[in-house]
Image (tube, rainbow, N blue to C red):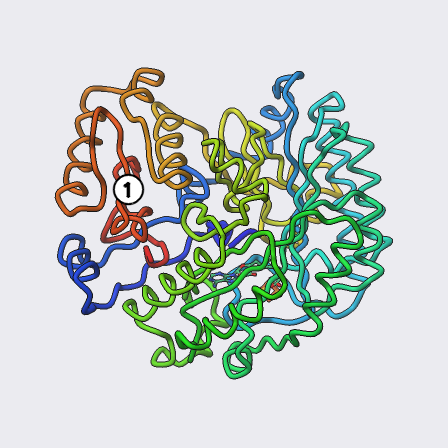
């Protein structure tokens, strides 16, 4: 999904929102220490806020041409279409109920895949293909087939290539699931958010549990070995009880993974969110309680907590890779995908290349025109500078493991003395508030610090401005 691509998930970065004063000692300590602090979601570093038009289509194609021959890549395809608009939505999406614009999009996307492969200049290996959205199930089975033909033309799929898709269970068809199964779909993530009828009504997103259950069994029958469910807290009129009831039902499906996202309210970027009465939104304290209750319920049910907001059963690859210290974080969230480079294609898609990040335009017409004229549809990006890679690694380990061997990292990727002193000074301030421990060069996030890991990571973010950042709430 592309939301911080809404700018974390997205691309556009969630705008700032005041943290409301609250009663818990943790919250009170946090508010008094940091005031109105918003922190990035760190699906990349530098974050999407630092992207600029200085990195253009020429840079993107030059960077593609210099990709190392022997290193396989991971591929991300953005399919923006949905049959409906959910009023909380922060994703880069477009409503379309007609198949023609979607089929036309699939054609242009296939051309972009061909052009990307030709810019690379050889048929690189691919270890993973992620279809994000929007709702990739909006493609017809025929659209899907053509896109995979283009992918296989341009890239050599590993035998165990991990093919994954984000799906709207209210609409995904059996024809789509069968075609995806033929193409080798291994993993699917289904958006549920809530099963409480009054919250579904408030956010304009009905979904029957029976329909979800059917999608689940069809996906398993088609060969998907790992099924994820997205849930949300902090939605309008949502209560703790709603979260518990939703989890009771969801757990009967035995999903392999769950993601539990806090609703990011960014009406300045997503004007349709203005439909919500701000008074209907749970405050910071209620959001924290909802997040903690969901986490507790899932841990009691045997799920391992992974990073900020993911949970996985111990047998699932996400839990196994996490336990081995190899979890990664990218624009799709927490992932087992350890490819150095991710090539994003489609409207608004983001690529991570050895030299930096590039992002396609989020303007559908501009994207299409560029591809038709065989120009890279890049709108902006950022080149890695100075010690960015060291900072990126520190943030990624804290976000993934809640722990970082900073002394070792600094030995491998040295920075200036001033930068190093700044890291330790900021971390000491977090330690004084009980959010981390510092011992023998290692930083460990404490239980109280866990909900604030994004804020802790700002110690490594040279661009972060606690008062002026355009980001969603840190909890
Ligand atoms: C691309 S959608 C998932 C697939 C499909 N479009 C659907 O909604 O079922 C990605 C996920 O982003 C999350 N999401 C969307 N808008 C959000 C927001 N404003 N704040 C937090 N999470 C959000 C939802 O959990 C959603 O399932
Ligand atoms: S179906 Fe998914 S991407 Fe589409 S509007 Fe709803 S939440 Fe957003």
Q: Position of residue 367 (x, y in %)?
A: 66, 48
Residue at 49 percent across and 53 percent down: it is 302
State the residue position of label 1: 445
Measuring 31% from the left and 26% from the top, which residue is drawn there? Answer: 405
Residue 108 makes an appearance in the image: yes
* Vertical side of 303 occupied by 283: above or below: below
The answer to which quarter of the image holds residue 197 is bottom right
Query: In the depicted view, which residue is nearer to us: 251 or 53?
Result: 251
For the residue pair 261 and 76, the one nearer the viewer reads as: 261
Q: Position of residue 265 (x, y in %)?
A: 41, 66
From the top left corner, tell me how far across and down residue 362 is, in percent: 58, 52
Instruction: From the viewer's perspective, tell me whether residue 133 is left or right of residue 371.
Output: left
Element marked by disc 1: strand
Is the CB atom of the residue marked by disc 1 within 8 angstroms of ligand 1's nearest atom? no
Relative to 185, is 405 on the left or the right?
A: left
Could you say where residue 274 lies in the image, as x and y percent from the top left?
Answer: 44, 75
On screen, residue 377 above or below 141: above
Q: How many marks?
A: 1
Please identify the quarter of the rendering in which residue 457 is found. top left
- Judged left or right of residue 53, residue 108 is right
Position of residue 286 in the picture relative to residue 382 (left or right): left
Q: Residues within 10 Å of mark 1 (few under 14, many from 20)?
A: many
Q: Is residue 35 above or below residue 183?
A: below
Q: Which quadrant contains ligand 1?
A: bottom right
Residue 346 visible:
no
The front one of 133 and 54 is: 133
Q: What residue do we see at 57% from left, 78% from top? A: 204
């Amino acid at each position: 999904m592309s939301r911080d691509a809404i700018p974390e998930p997205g691309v556009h970065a969630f705008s700032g929102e005041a943290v409301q004063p609250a009663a818990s000692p943790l919250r009170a300590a946090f508010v008094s220490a940091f005031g109105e602090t918003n922190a990035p979601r760190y699906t990349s570093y530098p974050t999407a806020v630092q992207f600029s038009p200085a990195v253009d289509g020429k840079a993107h194609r030059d960077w593609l041409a210099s990709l190392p021959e022997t290193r396989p890549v991971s591929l991300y395809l953005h399919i923006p279409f949905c049959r409906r608009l959910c009023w909380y939505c922060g994703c880069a999406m477009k409503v379309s109920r007609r198949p023609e614009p979607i089929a036309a999009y699939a054609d242009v996307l296939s051309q972009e895949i061909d052009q990307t492969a030709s810019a690379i200049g050889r048929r690189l290996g691919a270890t993973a293909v992620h279809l994000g959205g929007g709702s990739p199930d909006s493609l017809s089975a025929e659209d899907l087939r053509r896109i995979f033909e283009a992918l296989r033309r341009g890239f050599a799929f590993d035998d165990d290539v991990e093919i994954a898709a984000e799906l709207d269970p209210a609409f995904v068809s059996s024809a789509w699931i069968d075609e995806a199964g033929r193409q080798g779909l291994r993993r699917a993530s289904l958006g549920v958010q809530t099963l409480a009828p009054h919250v579904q009504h408030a956010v304009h997103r009905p979904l029957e549990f029976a329909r979800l259950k059917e999608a689940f069994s069809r996906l398993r029958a088609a060969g998907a070995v790992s099924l994820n469910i997205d849930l949300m807290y902090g939605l309008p009129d949502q209560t703790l009880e709603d979260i518990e009831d939703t989890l009771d039902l969801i757990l009967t499906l035995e999903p392999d993974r769950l993601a539990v996202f806090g609703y990011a309210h960014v009406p300045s970027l997503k004007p349709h969110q203005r439909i919500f009465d701000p008074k209907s939104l749970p405050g910071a304290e209620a959001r924290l309680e909802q997040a903690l209750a969901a986490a507790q319920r899932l841990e009691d049910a045997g799920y391992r907590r992974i990073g900020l907001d993911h949970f996985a059963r111990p047998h699932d690859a996400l839990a196994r890779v996490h336990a081995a210290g190899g979890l990664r974080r990218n624009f799709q969230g927490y992932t087992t995908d350890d490819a150095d480079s991710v090539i994003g294609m489609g409207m608004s898609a983001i690529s991570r290349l050895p030299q930096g990040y590039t992002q396609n335009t989020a303007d559908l017409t501009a994207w299409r025109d560029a591809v038709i004229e065989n120009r890279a549809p890049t709108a902006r990006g950022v080149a890695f500078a100075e010690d960015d890679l060291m900072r990126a690694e520190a943030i990624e380990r804290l976000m993934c493991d809640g722990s970082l061997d900073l002394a070792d990292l600094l030995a491998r990727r040295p920075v200036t003395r001033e930068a190093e002193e700044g890291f330790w000074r900021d971390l000491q301030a977090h330690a004084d508030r009980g959010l981390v421990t510092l011992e023998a060069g290692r930083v460990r996030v404490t239980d109280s610090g866990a909900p604030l890991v994004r804020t802790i990571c700002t110690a490594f973010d040279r661009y972060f401005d606690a008062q002026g950042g355009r980001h969603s709430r840190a909890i």
